[in-house]
Structures are given as structure tokens and as C-alpha cells.
């Protein structure tokens, strides 16, 4: 530890935290592809709003088409693949430029930033905003991912802030 300067430690911590999140993305992606049917069932229940309380004022929002359920689920999987690929390549870029100058290292953050922004889209916009606010997902006792998505966002946002800060020298 005495051989590492604080600036080197900051760079390595950004690389390591991106590697952690990339690993998370790989596990989520793997789960959605390997266990497609149970995860598809989850999405179908959310979109159909069949496990939320009966509310005639918002039932028009339900999407009951199985074809649309598959298409929306594949959209989510595609976004997960894209953010995971960006985060993995971004982590590699950070690692590759870990000994570079300040500006080069800062520029190596681009793919990581893009990946994290796409992940925020998936977990915040798609699940927390659309799932909870539009499809009333938080009313479902069985099919509610609000807290799970919040935990992901609670990691992503501080990571994005820490990553984008140009504090290393």
C-alpha cells in the first residue's frame, strides 16, 4: 500500500468499482437469458397489471399482448447487454490508461459513463418510473422490483459521480 500514491489509488478504485458493476451486469444478463421464462413471467405480470389492486382509473394502462410482453422484455435485455458491454469495455479502457496522463485517463471514462447512463435508464426510468408510476408495480405483492431497482440505482449514481470527477492527477 505504501507504494501506491493517493492518485493511483483513486484511479484503481474507479477501475475496481466499474469492474464490480460490470460483473453485476453480466449476472443480470446471464439470468435474463438463461432463465428467460421466469423473468418473462415477471415482466408480463407488471405490464398486464394483473397482480395490482383493481383501479378502474388506471387499468387502461395495462398491456396484455403476449407479443408486446416479449418485445418489451427483449428491449430490456438488449439494453442490459449494451450497458454491460459498455461497462466492460469502459473498465478495460480505464485499466489500459491507468498510468496515462490526467487528460488521457479522463477521456478513457467515456464508455463507462455511457454504460452507467444506460443502466440508469433501465433501472430508474424503465423499472422505477415506468414500472412503478405507470404500471403501479409497487402495488403488487409478488411482482415488485421497486426496491431491487432502487438498490441498483443507489450504487450506479454515486459511481457515476465518482467516476466523472476529475480528481486524480
Image (spheres, grey):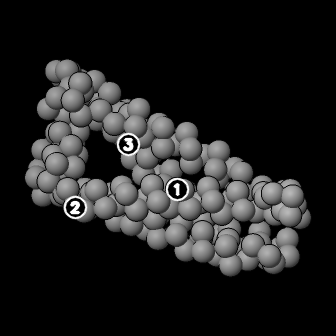
Asked whether 62 or 3 is in front, the reply is 3
Graded by Cα atoms within 10 Å as few (under 14), some (14 to 19) or many (20 or more), the crowding at tag 2 reads few
- Residue 142 vs residue 124: left or right? left
Is residue 122 shown above or below 99? above
Mark 2 or mark 1: which comes first in sequence?
1
How far apart are labels 2 and 3 at the CA level? 21 Å
Residue 134 appears in view: no
How far apart are labels 2 and 1 at the CA level? 20 Å
Name the residue tied to disc 1.
Answer: 21
Residue 54: horizontal and vertical position, in percent? Answer: 16, 21
| On-image quarter of the C terminus | bottom right
Instruction: Name the element at disc 1.
Output: helix
Graded by Cα atoms within 10 Å as few (under 14), some (14 to 19) or many (20 or more), the crowding at tag 1 reads many
Name the residue tied to disc 2.
Answer: 34
The residue at the point 24 percent across, 27 percent down is 140
The residue at the point 47 percent across, 60 percent down is 23
Instruction: Name the element at disc 3.
Output: helix
Is residue 98 shown above or below 51? below
Residue 119: horizontal and vertical position, in percent? Answer: 48, 55
Amino acid at each position: 500500500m505504501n507504494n501506491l500514491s493517493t492518485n493511483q489509488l483513486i484511479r484503481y478504485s474507479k477501475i475496481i468499482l466499474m469492474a464490480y458493476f460490470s460483473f453485476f451486469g453480466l449476472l443480470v444478463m446471464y439470468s435474463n437469458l438463461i432463465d428467460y421464462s421466469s423473468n418473462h413471467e415477471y415482466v408480463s405480470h407488471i405490464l398486464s397489471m394483473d397482480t395490482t389492486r383493481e383501479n378502474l382509473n388506471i387499468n387502461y394502462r395495462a398491456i396484455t399482448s403476449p407479443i408486446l410482453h416479449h418485445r418489451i422484455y427483449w428491449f430490456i435485455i438488449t439494453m442490459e447487454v449494451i450497458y454491460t458491454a459498455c461497462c466492460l469495455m469502459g473498465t478495460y479502457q480505464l485499466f489500459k490508461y491507468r498510468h496515462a496522463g490526467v487528460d488521457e485517463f479522463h477521456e478513457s471514462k467515456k464508455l463507462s459513463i455511457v454504460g452507467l447512463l444506460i443502466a440508469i435508464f433501465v433501472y430508474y426510468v424503465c423499472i422505477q418510473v415506468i414500472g412503478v408510476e405507470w404500471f403501479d408495480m409497487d402495488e403488487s405483492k409478488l411482482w415488485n422490483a421497486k426496491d431491487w431497482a432502487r438498490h441498483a440505482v443507489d450504487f450506479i449514481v454515486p459511481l457515476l459521480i465518482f467516476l466523472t470527477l476529475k480528481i486524480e492527477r
